[in-house]
Image (cartoon, grey):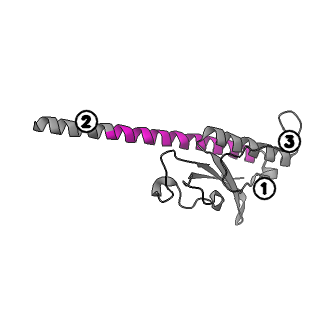
Amino acid sequence: MVAVVVLSIGMLSMAWQHAVALKYDKMSQFRGVATQLAAELADRVRANAAASANYVFTQDYNPGEVAVAPADCTTKVCDSAEVAAFDLAEFRNAARLSLPDGGLVVMQDPAAPAALTIWMLWRDPEALDTADPTASLVTGCPAAIGTASPRPQCMPLRVLL
């Protein structure tokens, strides 16, 4: 009887650990996608450094909004500002489609004009409450996330030009 109790406690513990491992695996997948998107956007910003100020995007977090570029730079020759707007729209849509309720914010530090911070945002499907301390990766999320509930995960990538 004691052996059955000990064995059942061990089996329940293993099942719980398996569920937790699956949760962290999914979170890791989201972080990997966010890192890849931010790194690709950083490469585009560096390639178009003359228009780096045009990559700044600080509108409120709205994951359902479809971004539309003013010009389609895949079919016509664009100037550097149009390329920046096209890149930004393309990556906002990529974040929206690749991450759950994905979005991005790009900020320029006034103290370091040759640096941008790309914030990748997404909602953790497990986080249901803004009071949950695990609802956001970083306590210093940009103000552009507003009062979204639940709070999105926030992951920054600093880009030096």
Crowd around label 3: few <14 · some 14–19 · many ≥20 (10 Å): some
- Which disc number belongs to residue 53? 1
Q: Secondary structure at mark 2?
A: helix
Q: Nearer the viewer, residue 133 or 91?
A: 133
Task: Please count the marks in the image.
Answer: 3
State whether residue 119 is above or below residue 109. above
Marks 1/2: CA–CA distance: 56 Å
Residue 45 picture location, percent across and down: 74, 47
Q: Secondary structure at mark 1?
A: helix
Name the amino acid, label 2.
Met
At 63% from the left and 57% from the top, the residue drawn is 145
Q: Which residue is mark 2?
A: 11
Asked if residue 115 lies in the magenta stretch, the reply is no
Please report contact status of discs 1 and 2: CB closer than 8 Å, yes or no. Answer: no
Quadrant position of residue 24? top left
- Which disc number belongs to residue 68? none
Q: Which residues are magenta?
A: 16-45
Marks 3/2: CA–CA distance: 58 Å
Q: Secondary structure at mark 3?
A: loop
Crowd around label 1: few <14 · some 14–19 · many ≥20 (10 Å): some
Of labels 1 and 2, the one closer to you: 2
Q: Earlier in the sequence, mark 3 or mark 2?
A: 2
Residue 141 picture location, percent across and down: 59, 59
Please report contact status of discs 3 and 2: CB closer than 8 Å, yes or no. Answer: no
At 70% from the left and 45% from the top, the residue drawn is 92
Name the amino acid, label 3.
Ala
Q: Which residue is mark 3?
A: 71
Question: What residue occupies the far left of the structure in this picture?
Answer: 1
Residue 67 appears left or right of 71: left
Residue 83 picture location, percent across and down: 82, 44
Crowd around label 2: few <14 · some 14–19 · many ≥20 (10 Å): few
Quadrant position of residue 93? top right
